[in-house]
Image (tube, helix red, strand yellow):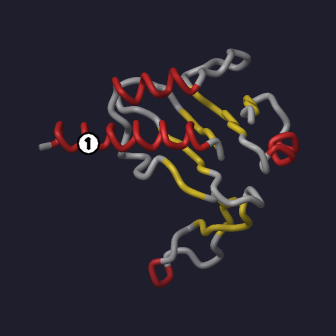
Amino acid sequence: MDVRIFKDDDKWDDVQDAQHEPFIYIMSNGSKLMGDELDDISDLLEALAKYRLDYRMFGHFYTVNPCHWAYNPSPNEDGLPRYIDGKRMYECDGVYHFFGNFESVSHVFRIDTNHQPTIDALVKAIDANKLIQEEVAA
């Protein structure tokens, strides 16, 4: 089965309609000006192999079955965060949300996908990047 690829200018409704088949939704990838074509996944994989991820703003770089954030009316009471998980963004299970940026180069990425080969490649590259981080810090 082919994977459907959606980029920033595609409609959210189209992504929702495609969620039960393999899809990649690239909301941002690369440091782009408005109207510039977003980078492909291969460009992100190259950046992950070359540049260190920015752990100051981000930390996990991906989540499974992402949710819309909901405002917590009582933040910081009993250690509760300002935002909490709201309604799930996708009906189907197994959607990964990848997000982040790099320390020394601007290459912001926000990608949702349920395409297993893409998930495997990005998780492997992020995990390898984390190991590089630990070696540099040691």
Residue depicted at 79% across the width and 50% down the height: 20
- What is the x, y in percent for residue 112? 65, 43
Q: Is residue 38 above or below residue 57?
A: above
Closest to the observer: 22 or 49? Answer: 22
User: In this view of the protein, which residue sits in the foreground, 56 or 138?
Assistant: 138
Furthest residue to the top?
A: 36
Q: Give the tally of numbered discs.
A: 1
Q: Looking at the figure, which quarter contains the C terminus?
A: top left
Residue 19: x and y in percent read 78, 48
Residue at horizontal 56%, vertical 27%?
41
Snapshot quadrant of residue 24:
top right
Task: Please name the residue shown 82% across and 31% down the image.
Answer: 10
Of all residues, the one furthest to the bottom in this rendering is: 78
Q: Pick the residue in front: 137 or 45.
A: 45
Residue matched to label 1: 131
Q: Is residue 51 left or right of residue 131?
A: right
Work out which residue is located at the far left of the displayed protein and give it.
Answer: 138
Image coords of residue 28 (percent x, y): 63, 31
Across and down, in percent, residue 43 comes to 51, 21
Vertical comparison of 134 with 9: above or below = below
Relative to residue 32, is residue 102 drawn left or right?
left
**Residue at image x 77%, y 60%?**
91
Mark 1: amino acid = Leu
Quadrant of residue 130 within the rendered picture: top left
| The N terminus lies in quadrant | top right
Q: Nearer the viewer, residue 86 or 128?
A: 128
- Looking at the rendered structure, the secondary structure element under dot 1 is helix
When the figure is inspected, residue 71 is found, relative to residue 90, above or below; the finding is: below
Label 1: few (<14), some (14–19) or many (≥20) C-alpha neighbours in 10 Å: few
